[in-house]
Amino acid sequence: MRKRTIRASEISTYLYCKRAWSYQREGRESQNLTEMAAGTEYHHRHGKALLHTLLLRSTAWLCLISALTLAVIWLIQRVYP
């Protein structure tokens, strides 16, 4: 008997739905390709939105830190001319 490698995606499929895992091993085509494509597209858009949000948040923090640094420098120059 030949040993075969079990991939993490197979374990995930098995845990989600044993029948889907069985169909996948048998090489059967999925009947809901349209829904799966829509789900993939949704996840791509969601990922882009998350990346955009992360970049905006990072920019906001950078602006805040820069403003605070400039305020402290300005105050020090006013107190110690």
Image (cartoon, helix red, strand yellow):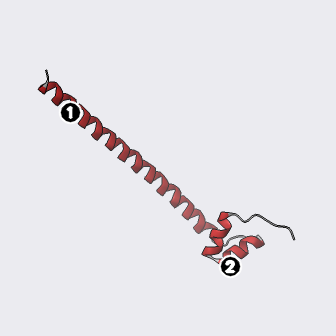
The residue to which callout 2 is attached is 19
Residue farthest toward the front in the current orientation of the protein: 80
Mark 2: few/some/many CA within 10 Å (<14, 14-19, 20+): few
Residue drawn where x is 63% and y is 76% of the image: 17
Above/below status of 60 relative to 3: above
Q: Which secondary structure, mark 1?
A: helix
Gap in angstroms between the C-alphas marked 2 and 1: 64 Å
Q: Tell whether 29 sits left or right of 51.
A: right
Q: What residue is shown at x 68% (from left), y 79% (from top)?
A: 19
Q: Which image quarter: residue 60?
A: top left
Q: Residue at x 45, y 49 (%)?
A: 51
* Percent coordinates x, y for residue 32 in the rendering: 63, 71
The disc labelled 1 sits on which kind of residue? Val
| Displayed quadrant of residue 7 | bottom right
Q: Is residue 13 left or right of residue 65?
A: right
Check the image and name the residue furthest to the bottom: 19
Q: Residue at x 28, y 40 (%)?
A: 64
* Residue 72 coordinates in the image, percent (x, y): 20, 33
| Nearest the eye: 38 or 79 | 79
| Residue 66 rendering spot, x and y as whole percentages | 29, 35
State which quarter of the image contains the C terminus: top left
Mark 1 Cα-neighbour bin, 10 Å: few <14, some 14–19, many ≥20: few
Q: Earlier in the sequence, mark 2 or mark 1?
A: 2
* Above or below, comparing residue 9 to residue 21 in the picture: above
Image vertical order of residue 34 relative to residue 19, above or below: above
**Drawn side of residue 33 relative to residue 45, left or right:** right
Residue at image mark 1? 72
Q: Are marks 2 and 1 in contact (CB under 8 Å)?
A: no
Q: Nearer the viewer, residue 2 or 25?
A: 2
Can the viewer see residue 28? no
Q: Nearer the viewer, mark 2 or mark 1?
A: 1
Q: Amino acid at mark 2?
A: Arg
